[in-house]
Image (spheres, rainbow, N blue to C red):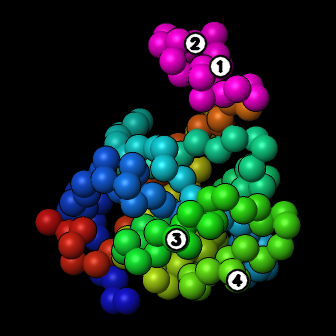
Amino acid sequence: MKLFDIPVNDLDLRINDLWYNRWFLLTSGDWKKKDFNTMTVAWGYFGIMWNKPVAAVVVRPTRFTYEYIEKYDDFSLSSFGKEYKEDLGYLGSHSGRDGDKIGETKLTPAQSTAIGSPSFEESELIIECRKIYRDDFKPENFLDPEIDKHYPDKDYHRMYFGEILKISGTQKFKY
């Protein structure tokens, strides 16, 4: 798929559709060492923080990808066409601890251009980020009691802010 560089100010997203309906693959690790893992994420956001364009993602400490995002300095977010929804569902419900889960899909890891973590050849949109902040969700700070219902096992997410270093996408993501 032909991707174009997209300046951050020219990115055109239907943000809620991407997070809620289409999802992303969050990938962290080292492409050159073939040491990486990916997981499907449906919670996160994009914005400006500390005068930088950022992507924010959350990962539970029980997830295998947590080990990678803790160990490495960057991560990618890859979005796909709807024909890959089943693959994203598989990657979100199986652990890389148990084997080559990517190999069970139609997706092909590829070297990113600005970071060490890989992205995917079939992506329609790739957002490459350098971690700049992390913090753990603290249940005592939840103002809405409904939030805690997402944590029956008390495995609260860690949030990561990544400075967006590069965006590549199809024409539909560019103003």
65 lies above or below 138: below
Kind of residue sitting beneath label 1: Lys
The crowd level at tag 1 (other Cα within 10 Å; few <14, some 14-19, many 20+) is few
Q: Which residue is mark 3?
A: 86
Q: Which residue is mark 2?
A: 141
Nearer to me, 104 or 24: 104
Kind of residue sitting beneath label 2: Asn
Residues tagged 4 and 2 counted as in contact (Cβ below 8 A): no
Q: Position of residue 161 (x, y in %)?
A: 53, 43
Q: Which residue is mark 4?
A: 103
Earlier residue among tags 4 and 2: 4
- Is residue 37 at least partly visible in the picture? yes
Marks 2 and 3 sit apart, C-alpha to C-alpha, by: 35 Å
Q: Is residue 114 left or right of residue 95?
A: left
Q: Is residue 89 left or right of residue 17?
A: right
Q: Which region of the structure is painted magenta?
A: 137-154
Marks 4 and 3 sit apart, C-alpha to C-alpha, by: 14 Å
Q: Secondary structure at mark 2?
A: helix
Q: Position of residue 41 (x, y in %)?
A: 54, 53
Q: Secondary structure at mark 1?
A: loop
Q: Which residue is mark 1?
A: 138
